[in-house]
Amino acid sequence: MNKESHYRSAVEDFQSAHQKATVEEVLARLQGKPNTLLSFEEIAKKLKLQARSERGVQTIPLEAIVGSVGRYSDFTRTFLPRNPSDQQRWALVKASLDENGFPPIDVYKVSGVYFVLDGNHRVSVARQEGWSTIQANVIEVKSNVPLSPDTSPDELIVKSEYADFLEETRLHEYRPNVDLGVTIPGQYEKLLQQIQVHRYYAWVDRSLSWSFEEAMLDWYDSIYIPLVETIRDRGLLRWFPDRTVTDFYLWVTEHRDALQKELGWQIRSEAVAEALAAKTDQAAEAETGSWRKSKLMQRYTESLFKDILVPLSHTEDGWQAMQQALFVAQQEGSTLHGLHIEDSQAHLEGEEAGILRDRFQKMCRDANLKGALALEVGETSEKILERARLADLLVIKVSYPPQTGIASLTSPLRMIISRVPRPILAVPDKAVRTTHALLAFDGSSRSKEALFLATYLAEQWGIALTVFTALESGRLSGSVQDEARAYLDLHEIQADYVIKKGAADSVRAVVRQRGIDLLVMGGYSGMTIKEFFIGSNVNLVLKESKIPVLICR
C-alpha cells in the first residue's frame, strides 16, 4: 500500500474514532459520568505538585494515562478524538506508524497515573490499534495524595481538600502510611475540628498544654486508629462498599454525638461501631462468642469493662447493684452509666428523681469515678436492652429471680439475660468485693465464654479461681476440665479444680466451703423446651445464690 492509500485509510479510521467519541459522550451524559481527560495544570494546582524527577524511558500501561498537559479537552477519557479539525494531524500520525511503532511519548507520572506532555495523538492512535502499553519518557511528580485511573474530575475536589489537609497538618510526615481518603467533600474540615476539640479537652481534663501537632498525633493514635481497627475487625465496610474507612469513621463519630444527646451519656466511638455491627448483623450478634471475639485484643491490652450500665430504682435493694458496679469500676477504671426508668414523664420530673440523681453522683464522686445517670420513660426491659448494647457490662439487681415452668419463660430478668449481648453481673444480695471466683464449667460453648472471663479476672484482678464441674447422670466425665486446665495453664493461672457427682446445685456446698464470693457461668442454652421441662441451671443459681453471678452468653 502506497503512502496515499495509507493516509486515506488513516482518515477513515479517524472518522470512525471521532464517531465513537460522539457516541461515548452522549452515553456519558445520559449516565451522569464524566468523559473528559484530566487537566494536569488543574491537578498540579489542586494537589500542590512541585518536586519532579526524570525516570527515563519506560513501558507504561495505556489505561493509566488519564490526562494531558494543555490538550485535555481534545480527547475523551479513552483518548478518542473529539474535534473534527484534528483529522489531518491524527491521520498523519496514524499513517506514519510502522512495524517499529512510535517514538516514545513524554509523560508526567503522578501517583499511579500519567499525563501526556507530548504525544497525545500517538496515544489516541495506539489505543485505537488495541495496544495495551506504550513507550514513554517519564517525569515523576511527587504527590502525597493517591490517584488512580478511575479518578473523576468531581473526585478532584476531595483530592484537593486532602492535599490541603496534609499540607496544613503534615500528618503524612509523622505517620508515613496514613490513608485518610474520603469520598465526600467537606470531611477534612470535620477532622480538623476533631483535632482542635481533642486539644481543648486535653487542657480542660488533663491540664495538658499541647501544640497542634501533639494533639493531632494523639488524636490519630488514640482515637482514630482504635476506631478504624474496630471498623475493619468487625467487617463493617461490607455494608458500605462505596465508602472508605475514614468516611465510616466520621459517620460513626457523628452518630455517637447524636446518641449522646439522645441518651444523655458519653459513649465511646468503638461502642457505637460495635452496636452498629450488631444492628446490621443481628445473626452474628446472637452467636455465642460474638462479644468475646470483639474483645480478644482488648483483653490483653486494656480493661474489658470500660462502660458499665446499672439500672436503678427508688428501693434500697436497687442500690446494692450500684455498689457492686462501683467495686467493678474501681478495678477496671470504668465509667458508670446509671439508668432509671419510669412509666411517665411526670414521675421523672418529681422530687424523687432529683434525690436519685444526687445520690448516684455522690456515690461516683466518693469512689473517684466518672458517671452519669440517665432518666428514661418506657418499658424497662427494652430500655435496658437498648442501652446495654452500648456498654461492656450490665450490673443488675435480682429482685425477682426467674421461677420454674412456664413462669420462667415470661420472666423479665430471663428475657434481659437471654437477649443482652454483653456479660451480666447479677446481684442477688449485698455487694461484695471479689477475692475468689468459682467457674462453673461443663465444656459447653457458653461455659467456654465464662472461662474467657474468669481467666481475665484471675489475671487482671489477681483473684483466686476454682473450676467446678458437676457430673450429672453420667452426662460428663472428669476429662471435661482438661480444656479449662489447658487454657488456664496457657495464661499461667493457678486454679483449684473440683469435680462433684450429682446435680449442678451441689455448687452450693463448694461456695460455702471455699469462701467463694463470685460465680462465673454460661447463660441460657437456648433450648427453651428443655428448660421448661427440667429447669435451668441459670434460674436455679439466681434463685438460691447469695453472691454475685457473672453470666456470659
Image (cartoon, grey):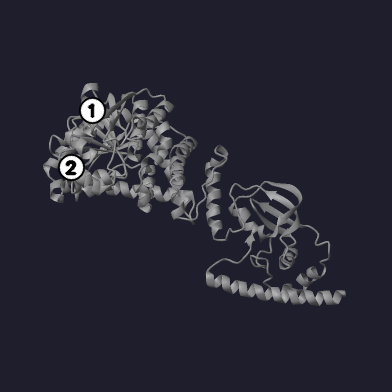
Q: What label does residue 366 carry, if any?
A: 1
- Taking the spot 44% from the left edge, 55% from the top edge, the residue there is 239
- What x and y, as percent, mark residue 483? 39, 32
**Position of 337 relative to 10 (above/below):** above
User: Above or below — where is 202 with respect to 466?
Assistant: below
- Image-quadrant location for residue 117: bottom right
Left or right? Give the position of 445 relative to 68.
left
Mark 1 Cα within 10 Å, few/some/many (few <14, many 20+)?
few
Quadrant in which the C terminus is drawn: top left
Q: Name the residue: 60% across, 72% down.
A: 25
Q: Measuring 68% from the left and 66% from the top, which residue is drawn there?
A: 79
Residue 334 placement (x, y as % from top left): 31, 33
Among numbered discs 2 and 1, the one appearing first in the sequence: 1
Q: Secondary structure at mark 2?
A: loop
* Residue 196, percent from left and from top: 43, 41
Q: Circle 2: is it few (<14), some (14-19), or many (20+) Cα within 10 Å?
A: many
Left or right of 474? Residue 89 is right
Q: Quadrant of the N terminus?
A: bottom right
Residue 300 rendering spot, x and y as whole percentages: 42, 31
For this view, does 170 lie left or right of residue 142? left
- The residue to which callout 2 is attached is 402
- Horizontal side of 290 relative to 54 (left or right) equals left
Label 1: which secondary element:
helix
User: Would you say residue 343 is visible in this rendering?
Assistant: yes
Does residue 65 appear in the picture of this structure? Answer: no
Q: Nearer the viewer, mark 2 or mark 1?
A: 2
Residues 478 and 182: in front is: 478
**Circles 2 and 1: CB distance less than 8 Å?**
no
**Which disc number belongs to residue 499?**
none
* Residue type at tag 1: Asp
In front: 272, or 250? 272
Residue nearest the viewer, comparing 491 with 253: 491
